[in-house]
Image: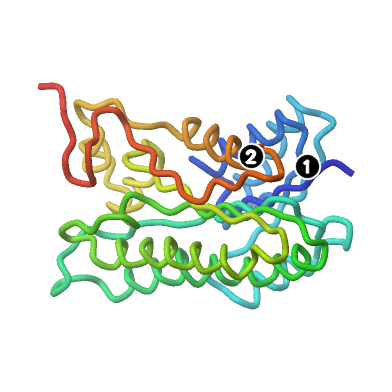
């Protein structure tokens, strides 16, 4: 069987683009997400272009510990031999100062960005340590490097991802398991549409007057990380649009 990559949050944006680049490079895919129709559409698209690639889709909410375990345990033993885990599922919800922030938004971000990452990693890593091989790439953010106004909990969740990644690397290095993080700046995906609860005008304004990164840029970098020789581990990548110098400093065309 070809190598297997499991990608969380595969139904759109970075996850979808990452699935396609790994398929192009002959990986078999386990694609996870909450939207069954999107998973089905993505599977059909990839299968039509890369008919030799085998694909499993798992529809569940990664915030749900039991649903995550049930989905993973539904895989055959052969499919559990995961070579690469891409912890991509994540979101920002709301853009409010700490004193008016929504508790529901906070729970959603922490449960998805931190706990969901931990749930699936805890399921996959025992097999990697037993086989003494594997690679985990966690999708963090510039928000995991810098904090910015009205983003306290989102920034906190992504700082947690960065810290967990570093500790994970230490824990798994004796088992020959690679671990790294990629921290994108501004990427034009569904990110801002989700953050602003479907307000397309607000989402569009984030990218106004600037050429952002695109999902394919991140996917290409993730694949680069995963395709290095056995003796090379890329621990941490900060990737930004040319026009973005920090989380808050963006040069926009007038």
Residue 93 in percent (x, y) is at 32, 60
* Helix, strand or loop under label 1: strand
Q: Residue at x 72, y 35 (%)?
A: 44
Farthest-out residue, left: 254
Image coords of residue 22 (percent x, y):
68, 36
Name the element at disc 2.
helix
Mark 2 crowd level (few <14, some 14–19, many ≥20, 10 Å Cα)? many
Q: Which mark is residue 246?
A: none
Name the foreground residue: 9 vs 201.
9
Relative depth, front residue between 251 and 106: 251
Quadrant into which the C terminus falls: top left
Q: Earlier in the sequence, mark 1 or mark 2?
A: 2
Q: Is residue 212 above or below residue 165?
A: above
Which coloring applies here?
rainbow
Q: Which residue is mark 1?
A: 28
Cα–Cα gap, marks 1 and 2: 9 Å
Q: Quadrant of residue 151?
A: bottom left
Residue bearing the label numbered 2 = 19
Q: Quadrant of residue 176?
A: bottom right
């Amino acid at each position: 069987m070809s190598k297997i990559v499991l990608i969380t949050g595969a139904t759109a944006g970075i996850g979808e683009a990452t699935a396609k680049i790994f398929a192009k490079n002959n990986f078999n895919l386990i694609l996870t997400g909450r939207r069954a129709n999107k998973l089905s559409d993505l599977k059909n698209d990839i299968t039509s272009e890369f008919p030799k690639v085998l694909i499993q889709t798992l529809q569940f909410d990664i915030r749900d510990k039991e649903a995550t375990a049930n989905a993973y345990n539904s895989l055959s033993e052969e499919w559990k031999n995961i070579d690469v885990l891409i912890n991509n599922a994540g979101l920002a919800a709301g853009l409010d100062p700490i004193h008016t922030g929504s508790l529901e938004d906070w729970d959603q971000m922490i449960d998805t960005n931190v706990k969901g990452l931990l749930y699936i990693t805890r399921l996959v890593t025992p097999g990697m340590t037993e086989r003494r091989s594997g690679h985990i790439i966690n999708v963090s953010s510039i928000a995991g490097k810098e904090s910015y106004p009205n983003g306290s909990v989102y920034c906190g969740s992504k700082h947690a991802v960065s810290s967990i990644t570093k500790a994970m690397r230490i824990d798994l290095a004796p088992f020959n398991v690679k671990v790294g993080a990629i921290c994108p700046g501004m990427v034009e995906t569904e990110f801002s549409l989700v953050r602003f609860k479907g307000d397309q005008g607000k989402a569009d304004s984030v990218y106004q007057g600037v050429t952002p990164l695109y999902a394919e840029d991140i996917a290409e970098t993730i694949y680069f990380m995963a395709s290095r020789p056995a003796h090379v581990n890329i621990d941490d990548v900060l990737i930004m649009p040319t026009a973005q110098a920090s989380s808050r400093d963006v040069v926009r065309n007038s």
